[in-house]
Amino acid sequence: MQNMNTISFYHILTHGELASLNSLDQALDAMHRGGYVWFDCCRASREDLYQLAEPLGLSPLTIEDCSDQNQVPKIEDFDNYSFVIFNYLRYSNSELISDEVDIITGKNFIVTVSAFAENSTAPLSGLEGLVRKNLLTIKSGPAYLMHLVLDNIVDNMAAPIESMEEEVDLAEEAILDSPADFDAAKLIYLRRNLLALRKSLFHEREILLKIIRNDCSFIPEKITMHFRDIYDHISNFFEMTESNRDNVTGLMELYASMLNNKMARDSN
């Protein structure tokens, strides 16, 4: 099999060593020599991903989901792996952008798929360095590396969520200061972003809930407690989003009321 330069191969050994591999053949051979193998697919094409399907026993449906950027977060169990879709979020120019990350976790392998979309910022591009700093933890199995990836994604959610919350506060100040000069379209965009955020967080919270209930075949019970912290963060972000969404609705009503009052005064 050919070497695929969009996929990096690593052998994570039981004593806590990360060894880089040069080809898919070497990676498949390493799967039978203890530890587990990490296939890191960054900007891989659909054809690249399909080359992993047969040797790893991946369903064609999983490959299709990895190469379809319109998927909602979810978790699925197959005979020899668990499949998770999560969103890496960023906020730029008052727009919430979701960058899909896919994780396939088996008995002796894990596949991470990111930056498939052309406009992706490659959210897992620095993951190798993070892995090397946490080898003593992730050496225990693929589910531990999966936890590290999801924990990193959720930690980075704080910045875009706080940016949106700040925009809600600024919109309130602008309305109170001068409703006639306020651009009501900002509230429409905020509400749209918050609805998209809520949808993503809702499904991701369900993923974490399934994991901590020990409903996933390839995530051992002894690690599920580590996922509880991620679940708590997601739940907190969900509550913040609900609160901000209510605030935006209230601001819409406030804006309409103040504008009507001003028009009435001007008319009188």
Image (cartoon, rainbow, N blue to C red):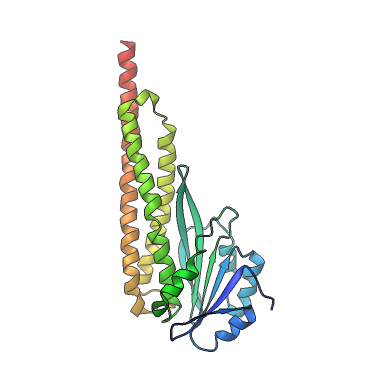
Q: Is residue 59 visible?
A: no
Residue beneath the point at 30% across and 15% down: 265
Question: Can you give x and y, in whole percent of width and height, for residue 54 in the image?
Answer: 63, 77
How many marks overall? 0
Residue beneath the point at 67% across and 67% down: 47
Residue beneath the point at 30% across and 20% down: 261
Residue situated furthest bottom in the rendering: 33
Question: Can you give x and y, in whole percent of width and height, for residue 31 in the image?
Answer: 55, 84
Image: 206 above or below 191 = below
Question: Can you give x and y, in whole percent of width and height, for residue 89 in the image?
Answer: 45, 54
Question: Within the image, what quadrant is residue 155 found in?
Answer: bottom left
Q: Is residue 32 left or right of residue 146?
A: right
Q: Is residue 58 left or right of residue 193?
A: right
Residue situated furthest top in the rendering: 268
Quadrant location, the C terminus: top left
Quadrant location, the N terminus: bottom right
Q: Is residue 127 visible?
A: yes
Question: Can you give x and y, in whole percent of width and height, for residue 159 in the image?
Answer: 38, 52
124 and 207: which is toward the camera: 124
Image: 208 above or below 187 = below
Image: 240 above or below 23 = above
Image: 56 above or below 70 = below
